[in-house]
Amino acid sequence: MAQFAQVSLTAPQQAVHNSLARFKVIAAGRRLGKTTLAAIECLLEACKTENDYGDPLGSDSEVVYIGVDKEQAKRNVWNMIQDIAREMGIFVFAHQNSCVLIIDNGVCQVRVRLLGMDRPDSARGMKLRYAVLDEYADMPDNVWDEVIRPALMDCRGGAMFIGTPKGKNHFYRLFSEALTGDDPEWEAFSFMSHDNSTLNRDELEKVALDYARGSPELYAQEIEGKFISKGGALFHEDDFPRDAVEPKHGSYFLTVDLAGFERESAKKTARISRLDDSAICINKAYNTMDKDGKADVGWWVKEIQHGRWDTEETAKRIVDAAVAVKAQTVGIEKGVLAQAVAPYLASYQAQRKVWLNVVPLTHGNQRKYDRIQWGLQGRAKRRLVTLNPGEWNSVLLEQAIDFPSKLTHDDLLDALAYQDQVADWVEWEGQDNYEKWEAVDPISGY
C-alpha cells in the first residue's frame, strides 16, 4: 500500500484512523477536520490491495465519497482529494465532469468516485471497497441499509459516517448503537471543535461565545458536537429537583417496566440491540403535615435500576430492591413478560423468606404519551418529583426531555410514570396534629 508520510493528522483524526473497526461513526463539532480525514481515508482505502480479511482487491471495486448532493460533495472535497493524491504520488487522472479520480496503488488502478445522495439510486449495483457518508444526518434514512450496505458485500468493505449532529435522528440512532460496543465491527467517536489543535484558539472562543449567547443548544450541537433533542414536549430538566436527603416519613413503592430479556450468549453475539432496558423504579412517596397544618407531599426517587437482564437476574433485582427498602407494593407491567418473570419472583421470595405485595400495572387503554402525561407531568411541573443524585439521573432526564421522540428510549420514564398507579395515595403522616374528633350527636354520628 502507498505510504502516507506527507500528510499529518490531528489527534482526533489519528484516533479514528488507528481504529480497527470496520464501520466508524463520527459526530463532531464544526471545523474538526472530518472532511479532510474522509478524503485521506478514501485514498488509503483505494491504495489497499487486499481487505482486512485477506481477500484480494482489484480495479473492479471502487471507493465512494457521498455528500448530501453531488454539488456539496464536489465543493467540499474534490480539489482537496486531488491535492492529497498528488502529495502521496498516486494521482493518475481526474475526470472533472464526473468527479472520478483514478489512482495507482502499485498493483492496479482504482477509482475514487464522488456521489450525491440527492440521487441515491446512482450507487445501486456498484461494487464498493469503501464508502464515506458525509453529513449523514441530512441524508435519507434508508440510504445505508438499502443502498450502501449491500454494495459493500462483495469486498466485505468498510464505511465511515461523519457529520455534525442535527437533533436526534437516524444519525443519532446509528451513533448510539455503535457507542454500545456490542459489535466490534462498529465504533463511535465524538469530538468538540476545540479538539482540533490547528484552529486558532482566540477565533474559536469568539465563535463559541457567539453561539452561546444566541442559543446554548446550538453551541452544544455545533461546537461540542452533542446530539440535542428537538423534543421537550412535556418535560424540562428543571422539572426534577435533586436532593440526597431522604424524607423522614413515607412509604416505598417499586414499579417495573419490562422490556425483554437477554441471555448471556446473546449479549456476545448480537449485532446491536435496539431494545429498551428493563427498569426498576424505587420511589418513596410521602404525605406529611407539620404543626402549622402545612402539607408536604411528593415523591423521592431513590434509584431507577436499568439494564438488559435475563429473567432470573430481573427477578432477583426486583426482590432484592423491594426487601432493601421494605416496599409496600411492587407494581409490574402486565403481560407476557410479567408472566415469564413470575416463577423466578416466587422462587427468590421463597429463598429470602419474604412475600411481596405484587400488583399488575396496566396501560388502561391509554397511549404511552397520555399515560406519562397524566401520571407524571403534573407532578413534575409542580416540582413534586425529587431525584436522589446518581448516575441514572442523566439517563432519566435525557429520556424525559426527548419524550415523545421515537428515536430515544423511554424505559426509565415509563417506570417512573407507573408510580402513579401504586403511589397515588399515601396515608397522612402527622395526623396527631389535628384536634381529636368528637361526635356532637352520638346517635347520628355528627
Image (spheres, rainbow, N blue to C red):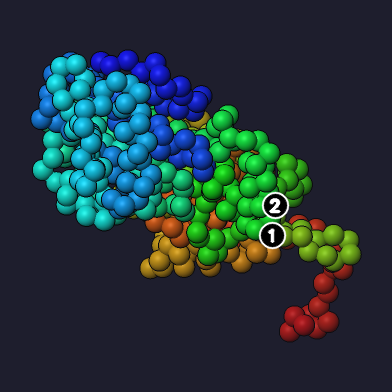
Q: Mark 1 sits on what residue?
A: 383
Give 424 or 78, whichever is nearer the viewer.
Answer: 78
The answer to whether 371 appears left or right of 194 in the picture is left
Looking at the rendered structure, the kind of residue marked 2 is Pro
Q: Residue at coordinates 50% horizontally, 60% vertically from top-left?
A: 231
Residue 184 bears which disc, if any? none
Question: Which of the 4 image quarters holds residue 340?
Answer: top left
Residue positioned most to the right: 292
Q: Secondary structure at mark 2?
A: loop
Question: Which of the 4 image quarters holds residue 140?
Answer: bottom left
Residue 315: percent from the left, percent from the top? 43, 36
Q: Is residue 431 visible?
A: no
Q: Secondary structure at mark 1?
A: loop
Give 300 or 13, whichever is nearer the viewer.
Answer: 13
Give 56 or 62, whichever is nearer the viewer.
Answer: 62
Mark found first going from the N terminus, 2 or 1? 2
Question: Would you call the spot at circle 2 few (<14 residues within 10 Å), some (14-19), or many (20 or more)?
Answer: some
Residue 223: percent from the left, percent from the top? 57, 44
* Contact flag, marks 2 and 1 (Cβ < 8 Å): yes
Q: Residue at coordinates 54% horizontally, 61% vertically from top-left?
A: 232
Give 78 or 130, whichever is nearer the viewer.
Answer: 78
Q: Mark 2 sits on what residue?
A: 241
The quarter of the image holding the C terminus is bottom right
Disc 2 versus disc 1: distance between alpha carbons?
7 Å
The answer to whether 248 appears left or right of 116 in the picture is right
Above/below status of 260 relative to 71: above
